[in-house]
Amino acid sequence: MRLMIPSIIELKVDADDRRIARLAAAAVGLSLVDAAIPLPLPGVKPGLANIVALLALARYGWKSAAWVSGLRVVAGSLLLGQFLAPGFFLSLAGAIFSLAALALAQYLPRRWFGLVSWSLLASFAHIAGQVLLARLWLIPHDGVFRLTPVFALAALVFGVINGLIACRLQQESVMEKSIP
């Protein structure tokens, strides 16, 4: 007769895990704020959670930004009741495209490229990913591309605004650390 010994699974949580959890929680909260803002055109949102991803990229690197974005997409969709719905996949496609753009953008010279330009690149990549997925899956007609100028204008406006906010938050963080 074999005795059953209970298994204990212990997860080691370190400072990086806690930091990513805090950043992801902030991003999820901002996603919920995004969802609550009434906008005239479906699919156009400010993308406030991207501010957190930009700060994670600037402070901790691409891996942290990817974790924050991925957790935001999954947790945000669960909280909004959209998990595995078309909106989830559109958000996921946008996040993947924007993370790919940020993976390349982080190697641009920081002398000329900073949080605002990163935000713009990520914003345009996000829209590109969503429009391509919508064309390939949801609306199999080239007419979907007629909305691209409207989405591109929104990406430009919100990309600049989010980049400026991230830049300001980054500056305040640096100033707080320098004050004795």
Image (cartoon, rainbow, N blue to C red):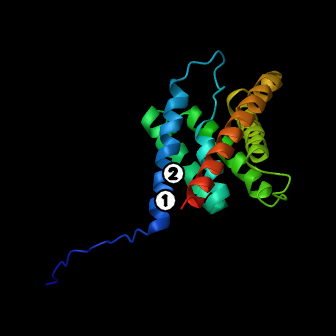
At label 1, the amino acid type is Arg
Kindly state the secondary structure of the residue where label 1 is placed. Answer: helix
Label 1–label 2 contact, CB within 8 A? yes
Residue furthest out toward the bottom: 1
Q: Which residue is mark 2?
A: 23
Tag of residue 177 = none
Q: Residue 11 at what x, y percent from top left?
A: 37, 69
Badge count: 2
Disc 2 crowd rating (10 Å Cα; few below 14, some 14-19, many 20+) is many
Kindly state the secondary structure of the residue where label 2 is placed. Answer: helix
Does residue 136 show up?
A: no
Residue 43, compared with residue 111, is above or below; it is: above
Q: Residue 120 at what x, y percent from top left?
A: 77, 40
Residue 31, compared with residue 111, is above or below; it is: above
Residue 28, compared with residue 45, is above or below; it is: below
Residue located 63% across and 35% down the image: 47
Q: Which residue is mark 1?
A: 19
Residue located 73% across and 39% down the image: 123
Task: Please state which of residues 94 and 112 is positioned toward the viewer in this rendering.
Answer: 112
Residue located 47% across and 63% down the image: 17
Q: Residue 66 at what x, y percent from top left?
A: 62, 55
Image quadrant of residue 136? top right
- Could you tell whether 110 is left or right of 169 in the image? right
